[in-house]
Amino acid sequence: QVQLVESGGGSVQAGGSLRLSCFASEYIYHQYCMGWFRQAPGKEREAVATVDRYGLTTYADSVKGRFTLSRDNAKNTLYLHMESLKPEDTAMFYCAADSGRFYSCSRIYTDYNYWGQGTRVTVSS
């Protein structure tokens, strides 16, 4: 059964840090492109970071230097370490997988066909 389960969201003040976690079914975790996306109220869902089967990561320009995607292969878990958070980072964050790719990951959310339930991040000024 396909499964993506996020956790770790919450409320922090600007400048603070959070770590999001995404547990994935083993096949998804080891085979497909995976990514973290976010959607702020009234805005389109956007890619935050992606990772391919080989561990190559990409980041949105808006989070480069502040967010880091990492993996724990023993736990089939993807992490998003977020530092220097800003109010504009406030959004629902989603973990996703694209069964159509295992490298050269897409940054288009409609290309991802497996999604977690989301975890909310709120950054106050």
Image: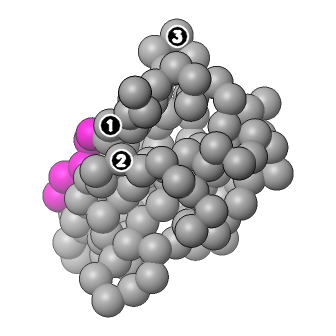
Position of residue 10 in the picture relative to residue 85 (left or right) = left
Position of residue 24 in the picture relative to residue 98 (left or right) = left
Other residues around mark 1 within 10 Å, as few (<14) / some (14–19) / many (≥20): some
Which-is-in-front pick, marks 3 and 2?
A: 2
**Magenta run includes residue 8:** yes
Position of residue 55 in the picture relative to residue 99 (left or right) = right
Is residue 16 something that shows in the picture?
no
The Cα–Cα distance between marks 3 and 2, rounded to whole angstroms, is 20 Å
Residue that numbered label 1 is attached to: 5
The Cα–Cα distance between marks 1 and 2, rounded to whole angstroms, is 5 Å
User: Label 2 sits on what residue type?
Assistant: Gly
Instruction: Tell me whether circle 1 and circle 2 mark residues in contact (CB < 8 Å).
Output: yes
Q: In this view, does 59 lie above or below 4?
A: below
Span shown in magenta: 7-11
Q: Where is residue 61 in the image (x, y as percent from the top left)?
A: 66, 71
Which is nearer the N-term, disc 1 or disc 2?
A: 1
Other residues around mark 3 within 10 Å, as few (<14) / some (14–19) / many (≥20): few
Residue at screen point 17% across, 58% down: 11
Which is nearer the N-term, disc 1 or disc 3?
A: 1
Q: Position of residue 6 (x, y in %)?
A: 32, 41
Residue that numbered label 3 is attached to: 74
- Mark 1 lies on a secondary structure that is strand
Residue that numbered label 2 is attached to: 116
